[in-house]
Image (spheres, rainbow, N blue to C red):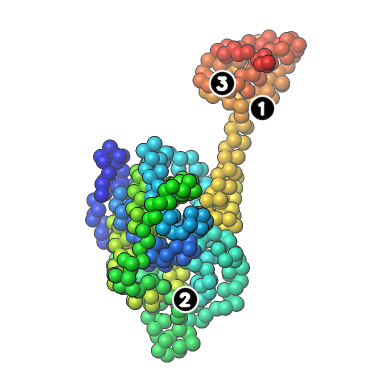
């Protein structure tokens, strides 16, 4: 599928890069993304109270369809843990998953409208400190959430990123419970997997691009567990501690696909849910796009409006075929970047691998220990929250580090969107404080001049009022002052009121007070 030429920004990476130009990098990366995405698709579906297959369908659509028309060469889309709470409540509210699917489709239509309205610019209004804080927080959350899986405690679903999970357990209580129920076999698989991924680049095997370190770590984990089964059954990893992909054959899978219940369109709640999904999914995708742009070694900026279009098409098709809502997902995207992905081929290929896995490879994939996948995500998490990132944020000063740190803490103790919102408020607070400290009047007369001249900046807003009043109040009695507003293009009423009403104060203090280029306004209260 392709966009009309007018919808593809000139020079966008998606338009400019030939799909198979870097296949030697993209295909191995797609294997890594596939290994990360598969349990996350199943886990998000399970947590959402939706059919397991709906998570895989969303992953396939996010990979193949959204990947093909995305505004980013590296972002990978699929079902997102950030929407889990909305999906759980939405399914219960509208009366079942089939009645929920029309809301997903309508949410996609809303995203198309947002793309057409060029609303993608919203993503650019998030301070860099907040985006970097989001990346670091996701890295820390991955580490904290994957440690239980690494030691064999799999009560929490894969892909959960919220502080409090649906069962009521929080991140720290899950860690406490995990260390009281460790499985030696799971620990051995996880430790070996992490060690292999760390040491892999230093070995001759790293030259084999089609065998990336995460794939090797998973393969060794499977082999080690099979060895446990044969030699030391008490160490063997079984049951819910393994990937649980439905293995029912093509016919069985087709029978499990939910179809939209179109009668739900008569329910006003479905339309309100659609608006919520469309707006929240768009915001999460735009934030993921900004974060992926920062991770891209080639520093390519994907088109935000094109991304909204791609996500809208993806949600329409995911809902139509019985899938969960789709968004850009930073965990998959960071795994893609870390594995050396270069173009959209990686995201598309990972979607194809999900199809093959569901149709043909379920018995084989169900041998993968979750602790082996936890090893991959632990290393991915560390690379998202490296000490260098914290050091860089610290050296940029308080106005950068505090929003960065607040965003991290807020995400760790709430969830992704709430944490970003809190970080954004703090970041805006620093911007406003800086604006308020900026001088509202610039002295332009030479020292010793009888007439003291001041110039106003290009814009004089209500934030300038405090500084403006401070300068005016400090004027000595009997002085001569001229304030020039000819270069000012915009006056807020609050600031204009302060300038004009000081005339009366100037008379009482015998100040020769002149205003040049400042519009007159009626300060008399309306009755």
How packed is label 1: few (under 14 Cα within 10 Å), some, or many (20 or more)?
some
Q: Earlier in the sequence, mark 1 or mark 3?
A: 1
Q: Element under label 2?
A: helix
Classed neighbour count for the residue bearing mark 3: other residues with Cα under 10 Å, few (<14), some (14–19), many (≥20): some
Secondary structure found at label 3: strand
Q: Residue at x 34, y 57 (%)?
A: 321
| C-beta proximity under 8 Å, tags 3 and 2 | no
Q: What SS does tag 1 mark?
A: helix
Q: Nearer the viewer, mark 1 or mark 3?
A: 3
Q: Which mark is residue 491?
A: 3
Kindly report the distance in space between the C-alpha atoms of the residues bearing marks 2 and 1. 62 Å
Residue 517, above or below 175: above
Query: In this view of the protein, which residue sits in the foreground, 190 or 242?
Result: 242
Earlier in the chain: of badge 3 and badge 2, it is: 2
Q: Which residue appears farthest toward the bottom when viewing the image?
A: 231
Residue 240, label in figure: 2
| Residue behind mark 1 | 466
CA gap, disc 1 and disc 3: 15 Å
């Amino acid at each position: 599928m392709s966009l009309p030429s007018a919808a593809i920004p000139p020079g966008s990476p998606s338009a400019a890069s030939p799909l198979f130009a870097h296949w030697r990098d993209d295909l191995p990366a797609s294997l890594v993304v596939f290994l990360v995405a598969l349990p996350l698709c199943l886990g998000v579906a399970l947590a959402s109270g939706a059919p397991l297959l709906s998570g895989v369908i969303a992953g396939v659509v996010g990979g193949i369809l959204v990947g093909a028309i995305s505004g980013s060469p590296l972002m990978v889309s699929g079902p997102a843990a950030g929407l889990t709470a909305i999906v759980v409540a939405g399914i219960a509210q509208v009366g079942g998953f089939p009645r929920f699917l029309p809301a997903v489709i309508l949410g996609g239509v809303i995203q198309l409208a947002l793309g057409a309205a060029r609303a993608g610019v919203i993503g650019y209004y998030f301070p860099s400190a907040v985006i970097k804080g989001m990346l670091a927080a996701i890295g820390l959350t991955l580490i904290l959430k994957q440690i239980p899986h690494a030691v064999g405690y799999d009560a929490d679903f894969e892909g959960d990123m919220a502080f409090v999970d649906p069962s009521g357990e929080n991140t720290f209580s899950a860690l406490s419970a995990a260390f009281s129920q460790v499985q030696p076999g799971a620990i051995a698989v996880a430790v070996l997997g992490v060690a292999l991924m760390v040491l892999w680049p230093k070995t001759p095997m790293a030259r084999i691009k089609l065998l990336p370190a995460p794939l090797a770590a998973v393969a060794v984990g499977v082999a080690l567990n099979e060895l446990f089964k044969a030699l030391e059954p008490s160490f063997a990893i079984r049951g819910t501690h393994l990937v649980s992909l439905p293995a029912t054959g093509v016919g069985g899978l087709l029978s499990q696909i939910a179809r939209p219940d179109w009668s739900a369109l008569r329910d006003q709640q479905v339309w309100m849910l659609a608006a919520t999904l469309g707006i929240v999914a768009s915001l999460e995708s735009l934030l993921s796009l900004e974060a992926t742009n920062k991770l891209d070694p080639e520093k390519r900026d994907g088109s935000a409006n094109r991304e909204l279009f791609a996500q809208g098409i993806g949600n329409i098709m995911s809902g139509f075929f019985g899938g969960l809502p789709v968004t850009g997902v930073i965990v998959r995207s960071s795994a893609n970047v870390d594995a050396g992905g270069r173009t959209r081929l990686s995201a598309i290929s990972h979607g194809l691998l999900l199809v093959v896995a569901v149709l043909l490879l379920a018995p084989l994939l169900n041998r993968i220990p979750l602790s082996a996948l936890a090893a991959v995500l632990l290393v991915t998490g560390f690379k998202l929250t490296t000490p260098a990132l914290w050091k860089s944020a610290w050296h940029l000063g308080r106005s950068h580090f505090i929003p960065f740190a607040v965003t991290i803490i807020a995400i760790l103790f709430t969830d992704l969107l709430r944490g970003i919102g809190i970080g954004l408020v703090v970041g805006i607070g620093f911007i406003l404080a800086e604006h308020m400290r900026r001088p509202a009047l610039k002295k332009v007369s030479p020292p010793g001049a009888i007439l003291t001249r001041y110039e106003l900046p290009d814009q004089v807003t209500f934030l300038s009022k405090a500084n403006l009043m401070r300068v005016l109040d400090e004027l000595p009695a009997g002085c001569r002052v001229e304030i020039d507003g000819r270069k000012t293009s915009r006056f807020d009423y609050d600031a204009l009121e302060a300038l004009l009403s000081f005339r009366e104060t100037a008379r009482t203090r015998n100040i020769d007070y002149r205003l040049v280029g400042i519009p007159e306004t009626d300060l008399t209260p309306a009755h």
